[in-house]
Image: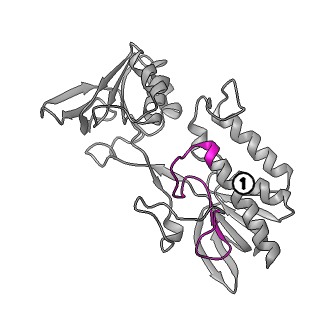
């Protein structure tokens, strides 16, 4: 059994920032992540809104620097999948892979995952033209027609990215206006390769072995349209990854509730990043959460 002062689950911006701050406070820090680090940041082609990072860099470059920085100050990063969390006698017991970990404090920074549409063809053609990451899979569809479903910052940003690769991009959005910030929305409207379908919902994705068509319905008129697409990128938001701590208090959207110190109702248990209830989910807010959680966990351990 491995022991630590601060155990962190998740090695995205929140988890690594927490590890960095806790390690610099003199704590023995172990960070567990199922893919070894990065999370959603690995899908970012151009990180252009992180204060002080300009010109834009790739998400992978940012996370690699943060991984190295956290290791430099003593944080140990282990690739494994956590299966259970328990607390006994003021100590946290975590099972991950074939190993068990014992820690005085625990920070959960498991983030969120892409929401699904749940329409016919989505699951069947996943990986065969149905994708949740344009940066990951967009290059496979060079000079082809593709669709993006969603209307927030992520959907519009990835549609702009795809417009630089594909021959044509259809954006399907269920409302009559974007939820994306004005600056990003204007870039979409000014791009000749992007066609926006407002008041429309995706009904079915079809194809024999790969995506061939997307069926959409205009919610205002009831009109059904069949769009010939080679890929469908579904970007309709995120769902918090809370399965490890289902009994912990959450808000109406299912995100964990904490105080300003990232503390939960369980002493020694802290939450940071996109899995936490808050008004804005960005890399900069995840890093901020992590810094506070790392500091708070260190202070908690020192007070034991």
Quadrant where the C terminus is found in the figure: bottom right
Label 1 secondary element: helix
Say whether residue 243 is left or right of residue 289: left
The image quadrant where one finds the N terminus is: bottom right
Q: Name the residue nearer the viewer: 264 or 167.
A: 264
Q: Nearest the camera: 161 or 196? A: 196
Q: Is residue 50 left or right of residue 5?
A: left
Residue 178, by quadrant, is: top left
Q: Is residue 263 visible?
A: yes
Identify the residue at the far front of this view.
260
Residue furthest to the left: 222
Q: Position of residue 72 (x, y in %)?
A: 85, 49
Q: How many marks?
A: 1
Farthest residue to the top: give it.
192
Q: Quadrant of residue 57?
A: top right
Q: Main secondary structure of the magenta part?
A: loop
The residue depicted at 66 percent of the width and 26 percent of the height is: 56
**Left or right of 244: which side holds 132?**
left
Quarter residue 92 falls in: bottom right
Residue 3 visible, this angle:
no
Residue 287, image x, y percentages:
67, 48
Q: Is residue 274 magenta?
A: yes
Residue at the image point whose x is 44% and y is 40% from the top: 132
Q: Position of residue 55 (x, y in %)?
A: 69, 23
The residue shown at (60%, 47%) is 39
Q: Where does the image place residue 114, in percent across and percent down from the top left?
A: 45, 47
Count neighbours of disc 1 (C-alpha within 10 A) and say few if under 14, some if 14 to 19, many if 20 or more: many
Magenta range is 262-285
Instruction: Reply above or below: 297 against 165.
Output: below
Q: Which residue is mark 1?
A: 291
């Amino acid at each position: 059994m491995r022991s630590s002062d601060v155990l962190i689950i998740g090695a995205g911006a929140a988890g690594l920032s927490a590890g960095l701050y806790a390690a610099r406070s003199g704590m023995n820090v172990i960070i567990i992540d199922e893919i070894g680090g990065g999370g959603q940041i690995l899908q970012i082609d151009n990180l252009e809104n992180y204060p002080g990072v300009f010109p834009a860099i790739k998400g992978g470059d940012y996370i690699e620097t943060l991984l190295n920085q956290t290791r430099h100050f003593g944080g140990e990063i282990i690739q494994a999948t956590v299966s259970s969390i328990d607390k006994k006698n003021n100590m946290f017991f975590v099972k991950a892979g074939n190993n068990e970990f014992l820690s005085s404090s625990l920070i959960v920074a498991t983030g969120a995952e892409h929401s699904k549409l749940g329409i016919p063809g989505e699951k069947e053609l996943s990986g065969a033209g149905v994708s949740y990451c344009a940066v990951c899979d967009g290059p496979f569809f060079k000079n082809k027609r593709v669709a993006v479903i969603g209307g927030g910052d992520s959907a519009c940003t990835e549609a702009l990215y795809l417009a630089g690769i594909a021959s044509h991009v259809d954006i399907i959005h269920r409302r009559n206006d974007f939820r994306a910030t004005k600056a990003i929305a204007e870039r979409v409207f000014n791009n000749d390769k992007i066609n926006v379908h407002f008041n429309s919902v995706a009904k079915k994705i079809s194809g024999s072995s790969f995506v061939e068509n997307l069926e959409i319905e205009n919610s205002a008129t009831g009109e059904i349209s069949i769009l010939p697409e080679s890929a469908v990128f579904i970007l309709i938001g995120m769902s918090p990854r809370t399965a490890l701590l289902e009994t912990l208090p959450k808000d109406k959207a299912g995100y964990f509730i904490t105080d300003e110190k990232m503390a939960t109702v369980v002493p020694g248990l802290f939450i940071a990043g996109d899995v936490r209830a808050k008004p804005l989910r960005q890399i900069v807010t995840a890093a901020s959460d992590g810094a506070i959680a790392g500091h708070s966990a260190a202070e908690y351990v020192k007070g034991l």
